[in-house]
Structures are given as structure tokens and as C-alpha cells.
Image (tube, rainbow, N blue to C red):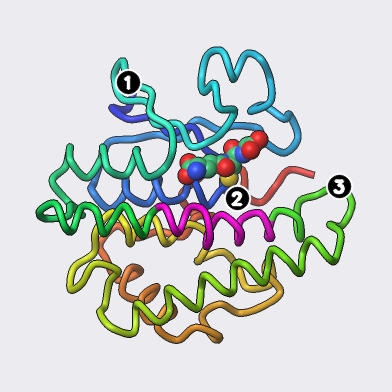
């Protein structure tokens, strides 16, 4: 049994952050596939009782610990492995500021938009899609401006906040209907810098469930 287990599925950018971190720090880990789409597994009483009361992935298991919320999992791993850590209180608070913004405003809206656009049994309402895309693009513009000032969110080196930001940003442009890299040049350069880190992998090469079974 691997030292770490990650409950995840390939289409989840929230889980990707943690899977990517596990690879970047060189952890001994294995994925546990969660049948989110066909089986509705996260909505079952069993999942909520035994895996995560919040009914979400990712869930990171390490020994007796079961951690949820990707930013908490990232913080835990960065401490355990001494990598991607912030230095000092100011940096720590700054990283949390960006992770919360990202979870709520950037990848929060972008992931929901992508879900409505690609994975609903019937196409999402165009007005809802337009709202979600608008919110995600507003947040992308904020982050693009920030990344025009320094290579990474907190400065010269990557931290947990940067791994968090990767969430949905490597998924194919056709899933969004617009090209993030082409529209936000500083985000694009950031994604190339993250991609160059040893251990980087694409979400569809890292987590089970892609391509989706018919
Ligand atoms: N803030 C959470 C978000 C987790 C999340 O929304 N995960 C999705 C999959 S990408 C999920 O499990 N959703 C199930 C639901 O909301 O019912 C995190 O960063 O871990």
C-alpha cells in the first residue's frame, strides 16, 4: 500500500492540485478512483460517512489522517516534505490570501463553468454559463496582472499558492471554449514555468477516469 492515497478523478482540477503536489514532492502515492459522474459516489451516504462528510474530492489519506480541502492538503504536504513552503508569517498569509481567492473566484468559477459546459446531461443554461465565464475571466485578469510583477504568486519561487492556482488551468482549451494561455500571457508564462518543474504531469496523465467510459 502506498504511503499516501488520493481520492480523485481525472476531470477534477481541485484534486489535480493535490495529485500534482504529490508528484512534485516525490511522494509514494496512489490514486483511489471516485466515480463522480456515473455513480454519483460523492453523494452517497457511504461516501459521506466513511470518506468525506462534505461530499467532495479531493481526500488525502495519510496513515490515520484523512484530509480534505485542497489548500489544506497542499499545506500538509509542503510541511511534510519541506518543499513549496512559504517563509515567515507575511508570506504564509499572502499564500492563503491567493489560495482563498483562487478557490472562490478563479478555479471555483472556472471549474463550475467547465462542468456546466461539458459534463451536464443537458447543456447548461447560456445565461448561467455567461455569468460563470465572466466571473472566471475577471479573476484570471487579476491573477494575470499579479503574475506580470513576479514569476510566481509570492515572488521568485513557487509555493503552495502556485500549485493551487494550477487547478483547472491545464485542461484543454476546447473544454472552456476559449484559450486561457492565448488570452492571459502572464498566466501562460507561469503555466510554462510550473510545467518545467521536475515531476510535473498533466491532469489526464495523473488521475484515473480519462477518457470517460461511455
Ligand atoms: N474547495 C474544495 C472544492 C472541492 C470540490 O468542489 N470538489 C468537487 C469535484 S472537482 C466535488 O467533489 N464536488 C462534489 C459536490 O460539490 O457535490 C477543494 O479545494 O478541495
Residue stretch in magenta: 100-114
Quick one: SS at disc 3?
loop
Residue 85 placement, left or right of 17: left
Question: Height in image: 210 above or below 102?
Answer: above
Which residue does the numbered mark 3 point to in the structure image? 121
Which residue does the numbered mark 1 point to in the structure image? 65
Question: In terms of image quadrants, where is residue 176?
Answer: bottom right
Which residue does the numbered mark 2 point to in the structure image? 11
Residue farthest to the left, as pictured: 88
Residue 66 placement, left or right of 175: left
Q: Which of 125 and 173 is in front in this view?
A: 125
Q: Residue 25, how many percent across, how many down? A: 23, 48
Q: How far apart are marks 2 and 1 (CA)?
A: 25 Å
Instruction: Look at the magenta stretch and give its main secondary structure.
Output: helix
Ligand number 1: quarter of image? top right
Q: Residue 65, how many percent across, how many down? A: 32, 20
Amino acid at each position: 500500500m502506498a504511503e499516501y492515497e488520493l481520492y480523485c478523478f481525472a476531470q477534477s482540477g481541485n484534486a489535480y492540485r493535490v495529485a500534482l503536489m504529490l508528484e512534485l514532492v516525490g511522494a509514494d502515492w496512489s490514486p483511489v478512483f471516485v466515480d463522480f459522474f456515473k455513480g454519483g459516489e460523492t453523494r452517497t451516504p457511504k461516501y459521506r460517512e466513511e470518506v468525506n462528510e462534505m461530499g467532495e474530492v479531493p481526500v488525502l489519506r495519510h496513515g490515520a489522517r484523512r484530509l480534505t480541502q485542497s489548500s489544506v492538503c497542499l499545506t500538509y504536504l509542503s510541511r511534510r516534505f519541506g518543499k513549496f513552503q512559504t517563509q515567515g508569517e507575511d508570506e504564509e498569509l499572502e499564500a492563503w490570501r491567493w489560495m482563498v481567492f483562487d478557490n472562490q473566484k478563479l478555479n471555483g468559477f472556472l471549474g463550475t463553468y467547465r462542468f456546466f459546459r461539458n459534463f451536464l446531461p443537458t447543456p447548461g443554461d447560456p445565461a448561467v454559463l455567461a455569468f460563470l465565464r465572466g466571473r472566471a475571466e475577471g479573476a484570471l485578469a487579476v491573477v494575470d496582472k499579479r503574475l506580470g510583477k513576479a514569476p510566481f504568486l509570492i515572488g521568485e519561487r513557487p509555493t503552495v499558492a502556485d500549485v493551487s492556482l494550477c487547478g483547472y488551468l491545464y485542461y484543454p482549451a476546447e473544454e472552456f471554449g476559449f484559450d486561457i494561455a492565448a488570452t492571459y500571457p502572464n498566466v501562460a508564462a507561469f503555466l510554462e514555468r510550473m510545467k518545467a518543474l521536475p515531476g510535473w504531469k498533466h491532469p489526464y496523465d495523473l488521475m484515473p477516469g480519462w477518457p470517460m467510459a461511455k
